[in-house]
Image (cartoon, coloured by chain):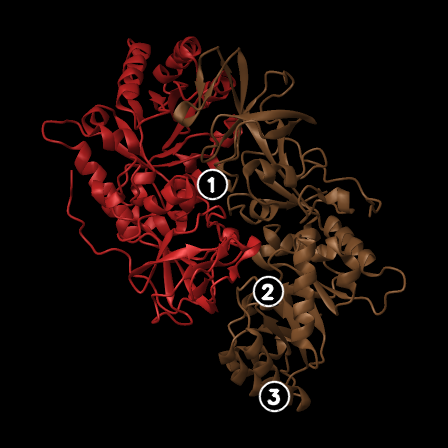
Chain colours: A brown, B red
Amino acid sequence: MHAPLSAPPINPIHACGDTPLALIDPAAIGHNLGRLRQLLAYPGCSPTARIWAVIKSDAYGHTLAHAYAGLGQADGLAVLTLDEAGQCRRLGWTGPILAMSAHITRAALEDPRLYPLHLIVDHEEQLAPLLSLQPPCSPHVWLRYRGQLNHAGFDRVAYRNAHARLLPGLHAGRLAGLGHMQHYARAEDAEYMLAERKAFQELTQGMPGPVCSDNSAALLSDHVGAARSSWVRSGIALYGISPLHGLNGPDLGLRAAMVLQAPLYGFQTLQPGDTLGYGGTFRAQRETRVGLVRCGYAHGYPRGMPQGCPVLVNGRKAAIIGRVSMDTLTIDLSDHPDAGYGTTVILWGLPELPIEAVATKAGTIPAQLCSGLTGQVPRRAAS
Amino acid sequence: MHAPLSAPPINPIHACGDTPLALIDPAAIGHNLGRLRQLLAYPGCSPTARIWAVIKSDAYGHTLAHAYAGLGQADGLAVLTLDEAGQCRRLGWTGPILAMSAHITRAALEDPRLYPLHLIVDHEEQLAPLLSLQPPCSPHVWLRYRGQLNHAGFDRVAYRNAHARLLPGLHAGRLAGLGHMQHYARAEDAEYMLAERKAFQELTQGMPGPVCSDNSAALLSDHVGAARSSWVRSGIALYGISPLHGLNGPDLGLRAAMVLQAPLYGFQTLQPGDTLGYGGTFRAQRETRVGLVRCGYAHGYPRGMPQGCPVLVNGRKAAIIGRVSMDTLTIDLSDHPDAGYGTTVILWGLPELPIEAVATKAGTIPAQLCSGLTGQVPRRAAS
């Protein structure tokens, strides 16, 4: 399942000022799109499933502004709201846009600049406004089945009813398409997936139309199954991150699109018995050289990160000690005499320190780390 | 220790669109400044300690732009960097600014627009550039003692040496002042505080100059002790949040400056045995009406929030069920038949649902919640 990684990982920037910095590499996003397309186009498969590049939540924290340059080969962009759809159009995107959770009103949908527009529809109140539209404002509608996730979506009976109500709109040309969508609650669980795929097939039997049910995890754990769909949706893998437990992006042929780095801004030497940080949660057992790193929970770094989580200093690992505070995390530099003021510390995103490993340490998932970065972290294009 | 709360809490906004919204009330910040001043000006105390309003981390997530209107009565604004100091000047602030962790170079300090400027100095490399400055660019310097926090700061010997090196600069008018600063590691622990205050007094004996050692927690747990300082620094209390475990802002006479609210955008009815959300962590025991709320970890809401955490729906509590996902959290609305599309859900910041209680549920501190909100949460002035 390996693909060659066609470029080196992101180069950290040295002497990076006095804030953390997230370096975003659009080329990695382009590479990851290519990798997913390669998986979907296995020999004998035709036609190839198309890929929605999921860029909600400001491209999972990578920022749409920086990610956009890597999205040229996407078949469509998937956002949550019509506001975000408008943002994509202003950036120059002319291809399909999928609004996954739009506030659907006739007025909002009568803006021809939004088209080609795909809409996920998941409750009855949305049907009437859709049926009142006139070309060229004809959205492609995807009905969402609630499945076992039980977030937005119709139950089985309401799904069939909604389909029956929208079908005349499709035939009259008010809708550009009518497809079937669901979202898995546990795409990493093969047995569950088999049952969910089957239940969805049974539900949609006799209702023609394209299908879009697979996300990154579904695609990467069963690309043959995913390739049978018309469209897949990929978010986390697009950014080079593995959605599969125990694997990292490079294991799947993906390249990380974000490096989080921060500068060393101070040092201390602790004597045995000295404590460090709020609450004094670290107590030195030996003489310990401490490095102060300008990144904390106000930047989105997890306050609950346990001591021992690795960071990279001049390419070698060092461990977090003490409690992460608002603007500072502290690391053990006893074995890093070369680290000085302004030395760049890597917090995640290089092959030696994948975001997946940092997330596991923090008891969370990588998507929470990258999308949880705050406005206090400047994003800059990787060079 | 109660003071009358001179105004009602923040009014949530109804029909709040399709993102969460943080409402910021500058009047609450003004009230909290007044409350802290009242505590410092107890009878017989003179002169009164001055208050640095700590507005680093974009005013702890409240945003400086929105908080600024409430800061008029502050004696000074405390930021981390010179960039942030420049931001305050551009907003029109003409009073003192304290840069708590500035990158100190002669070139950066030769901008007269930054003055009156106070600088915290905590390592030796910073001394030479300071001594090379000429009026009117004469900063007020505060030496930082590392104390038991052991973040930035001089040890005892280096502290005395730095003072001796800077004193001639003070006498020659290159420095506007030379003071003593430290930051407590456990300000909520009375016994610890007593020892730390004593150690700091011993250190600074024979070195005249103003003292600034107390933060919100120190001030609120020992306002008589705090009033002996020249300056105190208040961050968290400024925003109406209690730094003292087991108390909420209103218990200390403070008013919350932020309400986090989000709209209901969907509903489901679960039958007994149905699961909800990623990983299926909730399984319905009875018929359950689920509400989908547009707020998740990409907004900064804790992904690890345990089920059962309360929210407010039409003034009454409802509980989070299932796992918080990227853009959605799910609540049990079985006892809220009145909740419909667009109903506003309060996630924290009203007296019935203080941020302190939400933080305790999440196993964190309130500062992490408010400063951890991402750029995906619009901030709006409360009315």
Amino acid at pointer 2: Gln
**Mark 1: few, some, or many residues within 10 Å (few <14, many ≥20)?**
many
Q: Which mark is residue B267?
A: none
Q: Is residue A223 left or right of residue A357?
A: right
Q: Residue A134 carries which label?
A: 3
Mark earlier in primary sequence (2, 1): 2
Mark earlier in primary sequence (1, 3): 3
What chain letter is assigned to the residue under label 3? A
Q: Does residue B210 sit above or below A233 in this rendering? A: above
Query: What residue appears at the point 50 percent right and 59 percent down from the top-left corner?
Result: B328
- Per the image, label 1 sits on a secondary structure element best described as helix
Query: What residue appears at the point 53 percent right and 47 percent down from the top-left corner?
Result: A372
What chain letter is assigned to the residue under label 2? A
Q: Name the residue under label 2.
A: A87
Mark earlier in primary sequence (3, 2): 2
Q: Mark 1 points at which residue?
A: A298
What chain letter is assigned to the residue under label 1? A
Q: Does residue A39 sit above or below B36 in this rendering? A: below
Can you say which quadrant of the picture contains the C terminus of chain B? bottom left
Mark count:
3
Where is residue A333? Give x, y as percent. 59, 19
Query: What residue appears at the point 29 percent right and 25 percent down from the top-left corner?
Result: B189
Can you say which quadrant of the picture contains the N terminus of chain B? top left
Q: In this view, does A124 lie to the left or right of A191?
A: left
Residue A202 appears anywhere in the view: yes
Front residue (pair B109, A45): A45
Where is residue A116? Give x, y as percent. 67, 75
Amino acid at pointer 3: Gln
Front residue (pair A339, A2): A2
- Per the image, label 3 sits on a secondary structure element best described as loop
Front residue (pair A162, A320): A162
Residue A133 appears anywhere in the view: no
